[in-house]
Image (cartoon, grey):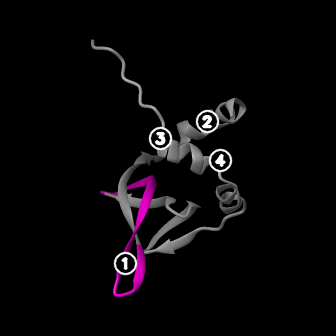
Amino acid sequence: MGPKRTKKLSSDFIEDSNNEETEKLSQGKKPAESGGETFFELSKTRRVTIRSWKGSKLIDIREYWSETKDGDSELKPGKKGISLTVEQWKALMEVAPQINELL
C-alpha cells in the first residue's frame, strides 16, 4: 500500500467559508428550484442540490460558474463538487455536531 495522500484545501474555499455573506445566505434560507431540481444557495457560486440519478436521490454540493449568452447570465454546474447518496448524507449529518465543535 502506497503513502496516504492528503489534499490541502484551496484558499478560495477557506475565504468563502468565512465570508459573512455566506453566513447570511445559509441562515433561514428557503429552497429554490431550477430545471425541476430543488437547491439551496451556499454562496453566489456554490449550491446544494437535491437530484435524482438512475432512480437514486443524491445530494450534490457543487461550485457553479457564470455563462453569458445574448446578454443574459446563467449559472452552470462546474466540475468542482461531490454527490452524496442519502446514506452518505446521513453519515455526514451524524458527525456534523463533532465537526461544529472543532470549528
Between the C-alphas of marks 4 and 3, the distance is: 13 Å
Look at the picture and state if 94 lies above or below 37.
above
Specify which label sits upstream in the sequence, 3 or 1. Answer: 3
64 magenta-colored: yes
| Of marks 2 and 1, the one in the foreground | 1
Could you say whether the residue bearing mark 3 is in a helix, strand or loop?
Answer: loop
In the image, taking residue 41 as reference, residue 101 lies left or right, namely right
Q: Are marks 4 and 3 in contact (CB under 8 Å)?
A: no
Disc 3 target residue: 10
Between the C-alphas of marks 1 and 4, the distance is: 28 Å
Specify which label sits upstream in the sequence, 2 or 4. Answer: 4
Q: Which mark is residue 18?
A: 4
Q: Which amino acid type is shown beneath numbered disc 3?
A: Ser
Between the C-alphas of marks 2 and 1, the distance is: 40 Å
Could you say whether the residue bearing mark 4 is in a helix, strand or loop?
Answer: loop
- Residue at figure coordinates x 51%, y 59% from the top left: 47
